[in-house]
C-alpha cells in the first residue's frame, strides 16, 4: 500500500510541474490509478458532500436496501453470489444536460452542493486530460476534442453506499471490472476501506485518505493511447462492520457520438501497417456492448468492436 501513487497537485503550474507530470506518467503507465492531494477542491466542500450523502442514504435509501437487496442476496444456501453487488446507488447526469432536478428525494441543499462539486470535478478532469496530453506529447486539448463528439462529453456521478454485510465472503460490494469510459474521479470514504485494484496478479488496497480524489483510467483512454495506458480491473470488498462505506465516482466520458480510435501521433509505423492494435468505434456502440459484459474481461470487447470495423467511420 505504501507504494500506491499519491500525488500532490499543489505546484502543478509552478516549479514542481515536471516532477508532478513524471509521477502522473508513471502512475498511468504502471498502475492505471493514482490518488490526488491538494487538487483544488476545498476540504469544506468535500466534508459537506460526505455529510449530506450519508444523511441522504440513511433517510431515503437504507430501508429500501435492506428490504430489496439484503433479503434477496442472503436467502438460500448458495456459497457465493455472482450476479449482484452489495451496494446502494443512484446516478446523476451532469453533461450534456443535467438531470439532478429530476432525481427524487434529494433536498435543495444536497442538490446545490452536488452541482457545485460536479463543476469542480469537471474542471479537474479536464485539467488532468491536458496533463495526460502533455505527457503523451499530444497537442494540448487533443483528448478533450476527441471526447467532445457533437454535443460535448458525457459526465455523470454514481453515488454509492456499501452497508455493513453479514456475509462478506459470499458477496462482493462491487464485482471486479474495468471502467468503460474516459477518466474517473472518485471521492471515497476515508474511514472504511474496500476499494482494491489488480496489479501484477495481486489485489491491492487503494488507501482511504481524507480529502483526496482517486483517479483511474477507463477503457477509452486505453484505446486512444493504443495500450500505452491501460484501464485496470478493480472491485469493492464488502465489510462486516462500521457504518458502511461511501463512494462518489464521477465519470468524464466521451460524448455518445464521439469516434474513439488510437491517436495517430502515438501509432508506430508498424502498428499502423498492421491496421492499429486497437479498434475504431463510436462510443455509444461500445457502451451498448459494455452494458452486457461489464463484469467480464475487456479484451473480448475490443475484439468485438474491431470485428464491427467493416464500414469507415467519419472522423472529420
Image (cartoon, rainbow, N blue to C red):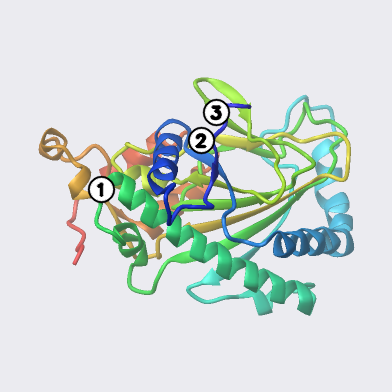
Label 1 and label 2: CA atoms lie apart by 32 Å
Q: Position of residue 295 (x, y in %)?
A: 55, 38
Image vertical order of residue 269 relative to residue 67, above or below: above
- Relative depth, front residue between 35 and 109: 35
Secondary structure category for the residue under label 3:
strand
Q: Position of residue 21 (x, y in %)?
A: 40, 44
In the picture of the structure, the residue carrying the numbered disc 2 is: 296
Among numbered discs 1 and 2, the one appearing first in the sequence: 1
Q: Label 2: few (<14), some or many (≥20) within 10 Å? A: some
At 31% from the left edge and 50% from the top edge, which residue is drawn? 134
Label 1 and label 3: CA atoms lie apart by 28 Å
Label 2 and label 3: CA atoms lie apart by 14 Å
In the picture of the structure, the residue carrying the numbered disc 3 is: 198
| Quadrant location of the N terminus in the rendered image | top right
Secondary structure category for the residue under label 1:
loop
- Relative depth, front residue between 289 and 53: 53
Residue 305 in view of the camera: no
Residue 311 in view of the camera: yes
In the picture of the structure, the residue carrying the numbered disc 1 is: 137
Q: Indicate left or right for 25 with 238 as reference.
A: left
At 64% from the left edge and 49% from the top edge, which residue is drawn? 212
Among numbered discs 2 and 3, the one appearing first in the sequence: 3
Among numbered discs 1 and 3, the one appearing first in the sequence: 1
Amino acid at each position: 500500500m505504501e507504494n500506491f501513487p499519491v500525488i500532490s497537485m499543489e505546484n502543478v503550474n509552478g516549479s514542481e510541474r515536471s516532477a508532478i507530470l513524471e509521477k502522473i506518467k508513471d502512475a498511468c503507465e504502471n498502475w492505471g490509478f493514482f490518488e490526488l492531494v491538494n487538487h483544488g477542491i476545498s476540504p469544506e466542500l468535500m466534508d459537506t458532500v460526505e455529510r449530506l450523502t450519508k444523511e441522504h442514504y440513511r433517510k431515503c435509501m437504507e430501508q429500501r436496501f435492506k428490504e430489496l437487496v439484503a433479503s434477496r442476496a442472503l436467502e438460500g444456501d448458495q456459497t457465493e453470489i455472482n450476479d449482484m453487488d452489495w451496494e446502494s446507488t443512484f446516478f446523476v447526469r451532469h453533461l450534456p444536460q443535467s438531470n439532478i432536478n429530476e432525481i427524487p428525494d434529494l433536498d435543495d441543499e444536497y442538490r446545490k452542493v452536488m452541482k457545485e462539486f460536479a463543476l469542480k470535478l469537471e474542471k479537474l478532469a479536464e485539467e488532468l486530460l491536458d496533463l495526460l496530453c502533455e505527457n503523451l506529447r499530444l497537442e494540448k486539448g487533443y483528448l478533450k476534442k476527441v471526447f467532445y463528439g457533437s454535443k460535448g462529453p458525457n459526465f455523470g456521478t454514481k453515488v454509492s453506499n456499501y452497508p455493513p454485510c453479514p456475509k462478506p465472503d459470499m458477496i462482493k460490494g462491487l464485482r471486479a471490472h474495468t471502467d468503460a469510459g474516459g477518466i474517473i474521479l472518485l471521492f471515497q470514504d476515508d474511514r472504511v476501506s474496500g476499494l482494491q485494484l489488480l496489479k501484477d496478479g495481486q489485489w491491492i488496497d487503494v488507501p482511504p485518505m481524507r480529502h483526496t480524489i482517486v483517479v483511474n483510467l477507463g477503457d477509452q483512454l486505453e484505446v486512444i493511447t493504443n495500450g500505452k495506458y491501460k484501464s485496470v480491473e478493480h472491485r469493492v470488498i464488502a465489510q462486516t462492520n462500521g457504518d458502511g462505506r461511501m463512494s462518489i465516482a464521477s465519470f468524464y466520458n466521451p460524448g455518445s457520438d464521439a469516434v474513439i480510435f488510437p491517436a495517430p501521433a502515438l501509432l508506430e509505423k508498424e502498428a499502423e501497417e498492421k491496421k492499429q492494435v486497437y479498434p475504431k468505434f463510436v462510443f455509444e456502440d461500445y457502451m451498448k456492448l459494455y452494458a452486457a459484459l461489464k463484469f467480464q474481461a475487456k479484451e473480448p470487447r475490443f475484439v468485438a468492436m474491431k470485428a464491427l470495423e467493416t464500414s469507415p467511420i467519419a472522423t472529420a
